[in-house]
Image: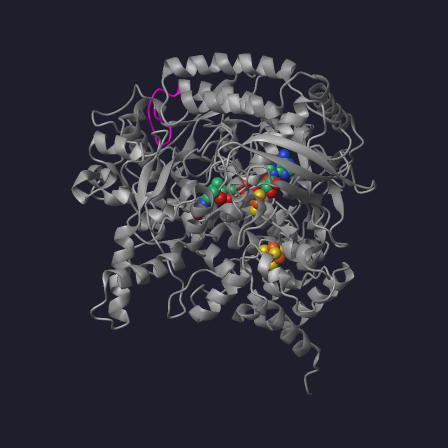
């Protein structure tokens, strides 16, 4: 099969407009006879459900949480990008496009990314119209901040709760359609298989998590908005329930999986505190606007700090190493995430880590607090303000900007980040890889679409901060509503799709057998035992640094772990009723296959790019070394029936508008 | 001061499903570290229960960082436990002492039926939003430019504060009348404070309050417990604003 991304003809900046002008439409009367299943109610799913229902389609929306408002998007903190150029700092659609391609280390599609940059401005307009309370300045206009990998301020935000506010906006738009009867909501439902009839996606098998029953749901198209798979690492900043099952089951039914090894390890997370740890907490990248990252310059100081004999606040400036500012003077603390994470690992591996485990660096706000305090004192006309007064004023300003993040940190670590620097370390955060989609966001299965973090489309090998929220809403509000019509235009005569067919029956039986097998294994270890083991293999061998030998070992270890899991798993209860352990077991079973694919993908890609750092491929000063001649493609994997032997299909990446060059943030 | 290795007595509400009656069951848990979160402590208990062949305790949780609103435990008689301004998942064991007895119960309210153990059905909150908790604007992408209407920073900030409600239901669980007015007031206030919300402000408050009453939530008698235990510090002023909006909406305009 040849992968065709179906990118429209024409100049880059006119492709989307031309596409919209010529795409086929479905008339309103016909839309009323067409069902669309949307799995997931995060930014991508909720926005898609609201938009398609407004257009007149009959939508069924699914989520496993008790309410659509609790999708993982709710946790996004820092902000959302848009090329509004409100700050008049030279931003433009082209610049956002360029930054995103460069930030992705030249491994994404030009046409998709340009479209994303184009619609970014509509997102902000739309959200404000919905009543999303973005931060504003004293003149009442919208405020912006900067994120990593850019030299402009284009990030819109709502304190540290941007995802919450955007999701509540999309959720309320969707709720309005639920109220009108245009969207039927299936909360506490989990999709466990995709049903294909005559080569087309025609429905899903879902488990009602309250009653435990398996249900068949049919539709003319199925849209997966099921988020990322970072939890394959067990510890990540993702919500506990985030999983790959919907995407993986579609993959097993024929959807290609693209660039699975492209994982984002976020530089600023709260370090691991002990074996009981169940998840990691992000400290938003926006903090790098004002926080300076450092470790001690001398090992003896690092040792003293680790032994709690020395306080960081007592270490004089000339004994500190602000290593990002030192190595990357042009971008300083605002280098992209992959670069910042590797630099932290490098310092900690070299013995300069600052917490008991040696795996932490400082994120220090003292300079910003004093700077803000001084400005504020001047504004208020306090001319001879004391140090303490300045600090107090500065702390107030920092609190206004990041209050909830500082509070979150203090809750977890029991240290006051206004008074002593935060300790941070990289953690798994986002997955650039995902289900392969073409320009229309359709997977390799006709009628099956993927939006948001679940697809692979726009971020190449590394995502820039504040771009996932942008992509999720772009896909759901402004892209899918056009592109899905091009497919559904052929479905207007299909009529209602019966679930009383062999294909639905077969899929339901397969799901039932799978769950029964998990329940009857009756081994001795709960799911988490295996999940932690998988996570450790992935983190050690397919994490921030990877090499051929380690990846080969990881593949063997995962295979062995899969066999162990099948026999040793202990799932209490039955299929009937609420059974969270059964839900987890099915998810981890899929992670155990995905993990192997990620390692195979990482092993095959013999270059370093973005978040994929193959230790064998680095420049003299330790930066990622891309191999553009041989690896300028999307690795897209087909499931062959044997999880250990996937088939690779390559989609060549063609750069017509951007000159591919070595990424430099110096 | 909590020690490094605590032993605790837990009294947990166990209820098989919404049809059967529940009861408090005693457990003892050892090796609890003060750095553990409350939910991680329950994870450890569950690991032990599963290994012993017992049914683990079902509870809602997802983000584990205080924002999704899933977690919902009534701990020692307080919604989300003893600390203020935090959710259950943000509570750490350092807030307890070796040897403590901890009572853990679900939210109790007619509006929130128990699904299993500590899990309740909060669908009523979704239905209240569906009744009017939105601004009717289609996703055309052809709205006004986002900066076309400046909004005074103070209004924007107050609207934001109201909008930070996570829909957890602690306010209901805490209130002797099972009133949902803090939750509803927060949403009504967010939109009442923003110009975009004005065209529909009358229908909105009337429809939301009507749905709230139909769901079986009680009335507010100004006790103020909700405000104290709300993990997002939503101020009880939102209830006053909602009442003003509501009575304003009931007054017929002159014609
Ligand atoms: C802590 C944190 C902070 C972040 N901050 C930012 C930020 O500041 N800016 C930014 O741009 N990005 C940020 N991100 C990334 C961004 O939040 C996510 O990439 C984005 O929200 C994903 O949205 P989504 O709609 O694709 O999926 P999600 O929001 O993850 O939603 C997935 C949905 O799918 C449902 N689902 C999944 N599987 C199934 C199934 N099998 N059956 C039924 N339903 C299912 C879930 O119930 C849920 O509704 C952050 C991420 C994290 C972890
Ligand atoms: S008002 Fe507070 S307590 Fe009530 S649902 Fe919202 S966040 Fe929870
Ligand atoms: S688990 Fe999300 S708020 Fe507690």
Residue at the (63%, 74%) spot, across then down: B245
Provide the major secondary structure of the magenta segment: loop
Work out which residue is located at the far bottom of the displayed protein and give it: B255
Is A608 covered by the magenta stretch? yes
Q: Quadrant of residue B27?
A: top right
Q: Is residue B245 magenta?
A: no
Residue A485 vertical position relative to residue A307 in the rendered view, above or below: below
Residue A426 placed where, x, y %?
A: 38, 34
State the quadrant of the C terminus of chain B: bottom right
- Quadrant of the rendered image containing residue B6: top right
The residue most toward the left is A318
Colour convention: one colour
Along the viewing direction, whichever of A435 and A213 lies nearer the viewer: A213
Q: Exactly how many numbered labels are in the figure?
A: 0
Rendered location of residue B207, percent (x, y): 71, 66
Q: Give the x, y percent position of residue B30.
A: 58, 30
Q: Is residue A538 or residue A23 the one in the foreground?
A: A538
Indicate left or right for B17 with A528 as reference.
Answer: right
Whether residue A419 appears in this view of the structure is: yes
Is residue A24 visible in this depiction of the protein?
Answer: no
- Residue B136 in percent (x, y) is at 61, 63
Query: Picture quarter containing residue A326?
Result: top left
**Compared to A565, does A398 lie above or below?**
below
For the residue pair B168 and A384, the one nearer the viewer reads as A384
Q: Is residue A244 left or right of residue B169?
A: left
Relative vertical location of residue A152 with respect to residue A133 in this rendering, above or below:
above
Task: Indicate the quadrant of ligand 3 in the picture.
Answer: top right
The residue located at (67%, 25%) in the rendering is B50
Residue range highlighted in magenta:
A604-613
Which residue is found at the position 71% from the left and 78% from the top? B250
């Amino acid at each position: 099969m040849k992968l065709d991304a179906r990118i429209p003809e024409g100049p880059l900046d006119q492709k989307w407009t031309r596409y919209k002008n010529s795409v086929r439409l479905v008339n309103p009367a016909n839309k009323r006879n067409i069902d669309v299943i949307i799995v997931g109610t995060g930014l991508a799913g909720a926005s898609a459900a609201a938009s398609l229902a407004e257009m007149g389609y009959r939508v069924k929306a699914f989520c496993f949480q008790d309410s659509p408002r609790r999708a993982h998007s709710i946790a996004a903190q820092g902000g959302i990008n848009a090329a509004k150029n409100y700050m008049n700092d030279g931003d433009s659609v082209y610049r956002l496009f360029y930054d995103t391609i460069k930030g992705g280390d030249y491994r994404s599609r030009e046409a998709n990314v340009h479209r994303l940059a184009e619609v970014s401005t509509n997102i902000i307009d739309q959200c404000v119209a919905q009543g999303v309370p973005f931060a504003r300045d004293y003149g009442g206009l919208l405020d912006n901040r900067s994120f990593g990998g850019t030299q402009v301020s284009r990030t819109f935000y709502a304190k540290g709760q941007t995802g919450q506010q955007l999701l509540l906006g999309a959720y309320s738009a969707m709720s309005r359609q639920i109220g009108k009867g245009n969207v039927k909501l299936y909360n506490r439902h989990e999709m466990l298989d995709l049903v294909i009839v005559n080569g087309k996606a025609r429905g899903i098998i879902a488990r009602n998590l309250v009653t435990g029953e398996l249900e068949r749901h049919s539709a003319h198209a199925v849209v997966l908005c099921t988020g990322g798979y970072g939890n394959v690492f067990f510890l990540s900043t993702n919500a506990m329930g985030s999983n790959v099952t919907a995407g993986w089951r579609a993959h097993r039914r024929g959807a290609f999986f693209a660039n699975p090894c492209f994982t984002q390890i976020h530089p600023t997370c709260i370090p691991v505190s002990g074996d009981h740890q169940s998840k990691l907490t992000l400290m938003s990248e926006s903090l790098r606007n004002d926080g300076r990252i450092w470790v001690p310059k001398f090992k003896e100081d690092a040792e003293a700090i680790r032994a709690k004999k020395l306080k960081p606040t007592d270490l004089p400036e000339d004994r500190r190493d602000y290593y990002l500012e030192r190595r990357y003077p042009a971008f300083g603390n605002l280098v992209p995430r992959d670069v910042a994470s590797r630099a932290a690992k490098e310092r900690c591996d070299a013995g300069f880590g600052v917490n008991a485990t040696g795996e932490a660096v400082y994120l220090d706000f003292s300079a910003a607090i004093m700077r803000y305090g001084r400005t504020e004192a001047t504004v208020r006309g306090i001319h001879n303000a004391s140090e303490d007064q300045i600090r107090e004023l500065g702390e107030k300003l920092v609190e206004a900007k990041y209050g909830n993040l500082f509070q979150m940190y203090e809750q977890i670590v029991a240290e006051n980040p206004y008074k002593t620097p935060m300790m941070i370390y990289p953690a798994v955060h986002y997955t650039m890889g995902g289900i392969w989609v073409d320009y229309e966001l359709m997977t390799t299965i006709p009628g099956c679409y993927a939006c948001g973090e679940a697809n692979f489309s726009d971020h190449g090998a590394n995502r820039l901060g504040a771009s996932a929220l942008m992509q999720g809403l772009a896909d759901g509000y402004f892209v899918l509503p056009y592109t899905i019509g091009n497919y559904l235009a052929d479905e207007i005569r299909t009529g209602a799709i019966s679930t009383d067919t062999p294909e639905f029956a077969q899929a339901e039986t397969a799901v039932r057998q799978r769950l029964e097998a998990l329940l009857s294994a009756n081994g001795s270890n709960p799911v988490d035992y295996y999940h932690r083991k998988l996570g450790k293999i992935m983190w050690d061998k397919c994490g921030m640094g990877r090499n051929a030998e380690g990846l080969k070992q990881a593949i063997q270890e995962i295979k062995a772990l899969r066999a162990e899991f099948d026999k040793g798993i202990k799932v209490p209860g039955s299929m009937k009723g609420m059974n969270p352990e059964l839900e987890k077991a099915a998810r981890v079973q899929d992670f155990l296959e995905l993990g192997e694919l990620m390692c195979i993908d990482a092993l095959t890609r013999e270059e370093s790019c973005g978040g994929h750092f193959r230790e064998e491929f680095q420049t003299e000063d330790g930066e990622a070394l891309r191999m553009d001649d041989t690896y300028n493609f999307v690795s897209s994997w087909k499931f062959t029936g044997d999880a250990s032997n996937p088939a690779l299909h390559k989609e060549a990446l063609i750069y017509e508008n951007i000159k591919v060059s070595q990424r430099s943030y110096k | 001061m909590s020690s490094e290795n605590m032993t605790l007595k837990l009294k947990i509400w166990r209820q098989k499903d919404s049809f059967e009656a529940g009861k408090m069951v005693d457990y003892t848990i050892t090796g609890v570290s003060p750095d553990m979160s409350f939910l991680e402590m329950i994870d450890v208990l569950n690991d032990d229960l599963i290994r012993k062949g017992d049914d683990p305790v079902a509870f809602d949780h997802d983000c584990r960082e205080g924002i999704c609103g899933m977690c919902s435990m009534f701990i020692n008689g307080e919604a989300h436990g003893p600390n203020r301004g935090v959710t259950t998942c943000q509570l750490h064991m350092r807030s307890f002492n070796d040897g403590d007895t901890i009572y853990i119960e679900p939210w109790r309210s007619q509006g929130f039926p128990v699904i299993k153990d500590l899990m309740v059905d909060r669908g009523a909150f979704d239905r209240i939003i569906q009744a009017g908790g939105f601004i009717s604007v289609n996703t055309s992408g052809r709205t006004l430019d986002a900066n076309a209407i400046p909004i005074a920073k103070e209004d924007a900030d107050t609207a934001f504060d109201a909008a930070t409600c996570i829909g957890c239901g602690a306010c209901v669980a805490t209130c002797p009348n099972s009133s949902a007015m803090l939750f509803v007031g927060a949403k009504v206030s967010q939109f009442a404070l923003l110009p975009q919300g004005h065209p529909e402000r009358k229908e909105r408050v009337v429809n939301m309050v009507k749905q709230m009453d139909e769901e079986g939530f009680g009335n507010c008698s100004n006790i103020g417990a909700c405000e104290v235990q709300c993990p997002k510090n939503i101020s009880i002023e939102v209830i006053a604003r909602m009442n003003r909006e509501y009575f304003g909406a009931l007054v017929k305009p002159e014609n």
